Image (cartoon, rainbow, N blue to C red):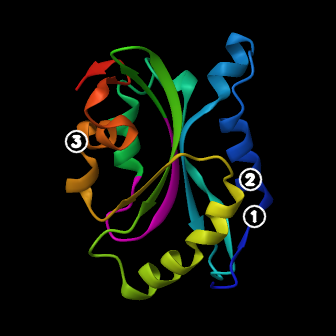
Amino acid sequence: ASGVTVNDEVIKVFNDMKVRKSSTQEEIKKRKKAVLFCLSDDKKQIIVEEAKQILVGDIGDTVEDPYTSFVKLLPLNDCRYALYDATYETKESKKEDLVFIFWAPECAPLKSKMIYASSKDAIKKKFTGIKHEWQVNGLDDIKDRSTLGEKLGGNVVVSLEGRPL
């Protein structure tokens, strides 16, 4: 463990994303579809990254495809943690699942990779009940939505975010 702590705001964001209570259209629009977390400047805590999120209300407005937009939020040369609220369909049913993503691109500085890797348990412990964890080491791993489809349910997933796989 790296001694890094998790900021309360991170836990709040997670709980808000996890609990799918029936809410008004307005509340649903404010729900986070995707959000990035980073280490604070002093590397002492994991915080919600400023302005790196997609709200459900953005989809169909400023965001055409939430998955592609999410991938574009990831920095090419540094690590991040992320939560992505995937909406997908299998042959039987429609599902929604939170995916915890550890983004550690090849070209990130070694020091960054080390501290993010050693702090991952700290944030994961706070994210109780997450079924899907995905470590991604570069755009090639993540830019194709079918890879996420496989993570979510193997070959039974037929569509992700309303788009056929």
Residue linked to disc 1 = 7
Using the image, tell me which numbered label, if any, was put on residue 11: 2
Q: Is residue 63 left or right of residue 36?
A: left
Q: Is residue 5 left or right of residue 140?
A: right
Viewport quadrant of the C terminus: top left
The answer to which of marks 3 and 1 sits earlier in the sequence is 1
Q: Give the foreground label among 3 and 1.
A: 3
Using the image, tell me which numbered label, if any, was put on residue 54: none
Q: Secondary structure at mark 2?
A: helix
Q: Give the foreground label among 2 and 1.
A: 2
| Residue 29 % position (x, y) | 63, 21
The answer to which of marks 3 and 2 sits earlier in the sequence is 2
Position of 161 relative to 36 (above/below): above
The magenta stretch spans residue 137: no
The disc labelled 2 sits on which kind of residue? Answer: Ile
Q: Are marks 2 and 1 in contact (CB under 8 Å)?
A: yes
